[in-house]
């Protein structure tokens, strides 16, 4: 049986601190999520993550034990911020 996944759209912020993004939509297919991304405002960047259900993808630092990221997920970045601004 295939793993059940959702495609999450997240706004990406310019900070280096994790997490540096927040969710704005979940979709059943990548195609629908990309279609939505193309229609969103272009003054920010977006990340598209393929998130498996019933799966813990947290990544903890081996020495400190702090949550530092995500592991085992597919990720795409859509860079728009600054591309449409005039100099």
Image (cartoon, rainbow, N blue to C red):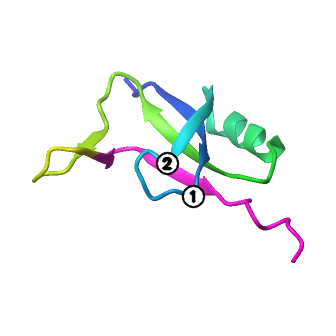
Relative to 12, 19 lies left or right: left
Relative to 55, 43 lies left or right: right
Kindly check if marks 2 and 1 are in contact, taking CB atoms under 8 A apart as contact: yes
Q: Residue at x 40, y 28 (%)?
A: 3
The magenta-colored residue range is 68-87
- Circle 2 SS class: loop
How far apart marks 2 and 1 lie (CA) works out to: 7 Å
Q: Residue furthest right?
A: 86
The foreground one among 37 and 19 is: 19
The foreground one among 79 and 15 is: 15
List the residue tagged with mark 1.
Answer: 14
Relative to 49, 39 lies left or right: right
Q: Is residue 70 magenta?
A: yes
Q: Position of residue 64 (x, y in %)?
A: 13, 50
Image: 68 above or below 83: above
Q: Position of residue 67 (x, y in %)?
A: 26, 43
In terms of sequence position, does the residue under pointer 2 or pointer 1 come before the other? 1
Kindly identify which numbered label has been placed on residue 63: none
* Helix, strand or loop for the magenta stretch, by majority: loop
List the residue tagged with mark 2.
Answer: 20
Quadrant containing the C terminus is bottom right
Q: Position of residue 79 (x, y in %)?
A: 67, 60
Q: Position of residue 39 (x, y in %)?
A: 83, 42
The foreground one among 87 and 54 is: 87
Quarter residue 65 falls in:
top left
Q: Is residue 71 magenta?
A: yes
Q: Residue at x 31, y 37 (%)?
A: 57
- Circle 1 SS class: loop
């Amino acid at each position: 049986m295939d793993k059940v996944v959702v495609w999450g759209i997240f706004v990406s912020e310019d900070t280096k601190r994790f997490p540096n993004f927040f969710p704005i939509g979940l979709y059943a297919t990548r195609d629908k999520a990309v279609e939505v991304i193309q229609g969103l405002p272009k003054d920010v960047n977006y990340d598209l993550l393929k998130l498996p259900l019933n799966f813990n993808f947290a990544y903890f630092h081996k020495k400190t034990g702090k949550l530092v990221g995500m592991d085992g997920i597919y990720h795409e970045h859509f860079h728009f911020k600054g591309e449409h601004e005039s100099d």
